[in-house]
Image (spheres, rainbow, N blue to C red):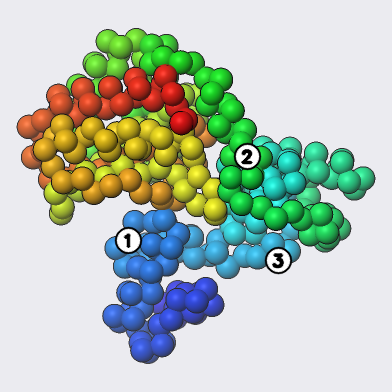
Amino acid sequence: MADVQARLHSLGFAVFSDEVGFYGAATRAAIEAFQHHRGLRIDGICGAQTWNTLVEASFSLGDRFLYRRSPYFRGDDVASLQQYLSALGFDPGRVDGIFGDQTAHALREFQRNVGLPVDGICGAETLISLRRLQAPHHPDNLVSTVRAKERLRETQQRLSGSRVAVGEHGGLSQALGALRRRLSAAGARVVSLHHPDGSAQAQQANQAVADVYVGLQIDPSEQGCWTAYYSGYRDESPGGHRLAQLVQEGLPLSLEIPDRGVRGMSVPVLRETRMPAVIVEIGPPSVVVERGHLLADTLTRALGVWAEAPWA
């Protein structure tokens, strides 16, 4: 706990009123504030996901050499590198703090263009050149965001023939079955994912080369519906944002439950999927049981509208 408190403090989340190593009200409030700031689920608990994000947040660009390896480098330093590259016109893909193949390609292209050794390693010399050429950047000006919108404009313009990954973590088999039948009737190819881990579902969706991912979850503690899309490191998924809006426009009304809004989040399944993705969370469970057919109908309609205009 002392390490957690030290990391929170270094990131500007004060825990002064708690003793070192003691999980008290101030530490819980600091964890919740950090979770909110990083787009995580807010529960005040430093579980594996929050701890990993705390560790990633401790890295600044230049603290370590960055290159393509397995497992991938992850952290704020990677996100800073991606923002530099994207602002300069070299597309690393979505700014997600994960040093994957597209980031490695963008880095090599940058090195080639500025006359550096093309080794795909962000070391001292490459970092000097990046900072020397840095451009003022804003999410709307990042080449990664612009190209993501271009790819959406060029994608298939109907639901029929699209590959839709649908994920759930248990308790939704009936609703998932109804959704699968509706989507199949509309001509979509459905990939059902049931792994309890969000990162594993993201990997499965990526391997299936899905065009879109929809995750369904139950919140037994609250009543209502909210839909989340990827947002983090001053970047977001434009296709995911559009789909989240369409889902949220219809689902609460259809199910006659409170509208809890659209949220930008950075949980693993949204951060790690390579296609537009959303998570739809609904509570209480009785709503899903009683109105699963309405849930399936509404989501299918939203996906149909989205397929015709995946970014607007």
The image quarter in which residue 226 lies: top left
In this rendering, the label closer to the viewer, 2 or 1: 2
User: Mark 2: few, some, or many residues within 10 Å (few <14, many ≥20)?
Assistant: many
Residue 124 in the figure: left or right of residue 239:
right
Q: Secondary structure beneath disc 2?
A: helix
**Alpha carbons under labels 2 and 1: distance apart:** 29 Å
Disc 1 target residue: 42
The three-letter code of the residue at mark 2 reads Ser
Mark 2 in CB contact with mark 1 (< 8 angstroms): no
Q: Secondary structure beneath disc 3?
A: loop
Looking at the picture, tell me which residue is in the foreground, 50 or 30: 30
User: Mark 3: few, some, or many residues within 10 Å (few <14, many ≥20)?
Assistant: few
Residue 249 in the figure: left or right of residue 129:
left
**Alpha carbons under labels 3 and 1: distance apart:** 29 Å
Q: How many labels were placed on the picture? A: 3
Disc 2 target residue: 144
Q: Residue at x 11, y 30 (%)?
A: 291
Label placed on residue 90: none
Q: Position of residue 188 (x, y in %)?
A: 36, 14
The three-letter code of the residue at mark 1 reads Ile
User: Mark 1: few, some, or many residues within 10 Å (few <14, many ≥20)?
Assistant: some
Between disc 3 and disc 1, whose residue precedes? 1
Q: Up-down: is 296 above or below 167?
A: above
Q: Residue at x 52, y 73 (%)?
A: 11
Label placed on residue 63: 3
Q: Position of residue 70 (x, y in %)?
A: 63, 44
Q: Up-down: is 36 above or below 297?
A: below
